[in-house]
Amino acid sequence: MHVAFCAAVLVFLIAPILVVVPLSFNAEPYFTFTEGMLRLDADAYSLRWYASIVEDEAWLRALVNSLVIGVSATAVATVLGTLAALGLASPAMPGRPLVMGLLISPMVTPVIISAAGFFFFYSSLGLAQTHLGLILAHAALGTPFVVITVTATLAGFDVNLTRAAASLGAGPWRTFRRVQLPLIAPGVLSGALFAFATSFDEVVAVLFMGGIDQRTIPRQMWSGIREQISPAILAVATFLIAFALLLMGVVEWLRRRGSQAD
Amino acid sequence: MANPRFPGNRGPTLRAVGLTLPLVAFIGVTFLAPLAAMLIRSVYDPVVADALPETLATLASWDGERIPDETVFRALADELVAAAEARTVGQVATRLNRVESGLRSVVTRTARRLRDAEIDPEAATPWRNAVVSVADAWEDPGTWRAVRRAGERVTPRHYLNALDLDQGAHDEIVRQPEDLRIYGALLLRTLVVSTSITVLCLLLGYPVAYLIAHAAPTRANLLLLLVLVPFWTSLLVRTTAWIVLLQSRGVVNDLLVTAGILGDEERLQMIYNMTGTIVAMTHVLLPFMVLPLYAVMRTIPTLHMSAAASLGASFGQAFRRIYWPQTLPGVGAGSLLVFILAIGYYITPALVGGRTGQLISNMIAYHMQQSLNWGLAAALGGILLACVVGLYLLYDRLVGVERMRLG
């Protein structure tokens, strides 16, 4: 009975995502399986919704915006987050719990509150409706993930390695680059992917402070769902599912590698 | 790295602080300053005070009961006309209207008409006559009390309104009229829904985490994927998926009709209401319950349960006395995480909640984007933030933020 219950819960978790994929190939503008689809009739399937998003310039612009904002925010979050995690890992760091709590706060603050704050503050600086404003906002939202993953990697880090490097005459920078960085690289990369996924899926800050020129993919989906939901949304959703699988695969691979190194 | 053999050496401390400082400064400017801006906005509103400084200064000595002096009317007339020319009168009218509804048209009309009004210099109170001839609301002391109250730069009004309260004629705190009491009920609904979702996630997630934690490694990895895929999939995609499944011409209703369980006219309304919000949010938040539970359960040796069984305990006894207590850190972590996320959820209720499935966040978004009552939006945000900070501190006390892990 336990197994049956768990199977039902796991179906509940995964089925909605799986249902989206075949429906995105629907030849009809419906959100349900047509009789032809159930008969596996080739004519009931088509790529028309994929064609419609590829031809639609709005989606292309949204993709470019998502990538520009996501990559820039991730770069900022990864560099600052990794440095901070290195500092926090040192036993000499004063006030560690407080600083850690402060740095994690963007992750646990409801995004509706952060987005309202972003709107008020960035508007007063003239950064609302600019790419820079959104990059800074998304970088802030992404840093906790980098701090957490790199801190977790550093928890298993053998301090004697840096001491050994130092005793062999390596300076702090060389020790970092040749000894520490290769060992924490999986954690850094995982954190960067988490930060990118956060930005790539973020819609509330974009809604509040982005203009027409900052429409990202989630923002475009939001409009699509609210205004006129068409199976084209499901084609985008399928693309996003594939992308999520890719990100997840890389992060899991990095984690396996990290735990093998222990 | 610190060298404990040289306690007097300050280098490591400086180095650690130096590495952390850039991010602390960055978060301070890009995240904490915006939060502060929101909190300031919730208590500070200078629009009326800036537009009507002279009026408010002359009103300061007014007793609050009779009609104010001629000097007050004159100041008001001058400043309203100036505000109309500076195109700020609309903002002033909106603020006054929020204190006393109906004042919007009174203010804009007064400002517009006074521009070309003829003032009779012979009369004893020419300005008062001119102002009152536009709208007799200016003969009501209540209107002037509203002007004085709207002129306060620092005001508790937004927080009071967010709690369904208001200031009465003599600054006493009164409850809003029954038809305006919406936020208290909404806050309560948000708490009830968040609690229900947390309980649902725990009931669904606990057995699953148990199964995964004690399965053979290959099987466990496979099952874990079924939890991780939704965890990584875009929130909008998952919400869209529920729309596809649950709408009246959607997959679930079609299945029920095809199976003959429902007639074509009896399709269930499972979305755009509270059901939609609860189902979709439980789906979205379930991985946040399963993953911390799994992390804790993985470390509990199965030997404990076998030992209890060999000593004659039934499964129920062994579970209750041996297993469950050891999983409490995971239960606490998962529940608080789900609850914190649920209480501030916006996207999912907005898309699948319809009219009856909205939560407090949706009201914040409404005041941010539609009614443009930013002060009230900020106050609602401040209250929500206080709830979350309280829970966060509880989480830190129980679990420790330093031990937070992802996946």
Image (tube, grey):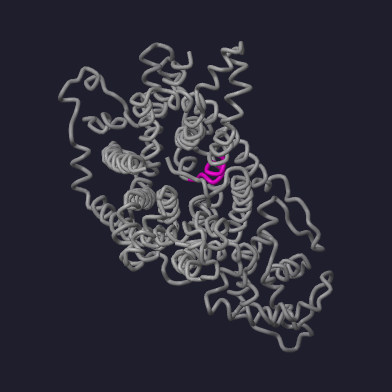
Quick check: B127 left or right of B267? right
Closest to the observer, B159 or A108:
A108
Quick check: B251 left or right of B3? left
Horizontal and vertical percent position of residue B191: 62, 40
Residue B227 belongs to the span the image colors magenta: no
Closest to the observer, A70 or A6:
A6
Q: Main secondary structure of the magenta part?
A: helix
| Magenta-tinted stretch | B339-346
The quarter of the picture where residue A8 lies is top left
Q: Above or below — where is B339 with respect to A122?
A: above
**Does residue B321 appear anywhere in the picture?**
yes
Residue at the location (37% across, 44% down)? Answer: A227
Closest to the observer, A176 or A164:
A164
Q: Residue furthest bottom?
A: B121
Quick check: A243 left or right of B54? left
Number of disc labels: 0
Residue B345 belongs to the span the image colors magenta: yes
Horizontal and vertical percent position of residue A123: 46, 68
Give the quadrant of the C terminus of chain A. Answer: top left
Horizontal and vertical percent position of residue A55: 18, 47
Residue at the location (36% across, 55% down)? Answer: A161
Q: Above or below — where is B245 with respect to B109?
A: above
Horizontal and vertical percent position of residue B162: 66, 53
**Does residue A237 appear anywhere in the picture?**
no
Closest to the observer, A262 or B334:
A262
Residue at the location (53% across, 79% down)? Answer: B86
Q: Above or below — where is B308 with respect to A31?
A: above
Quick check: B275 left or right of B127? left
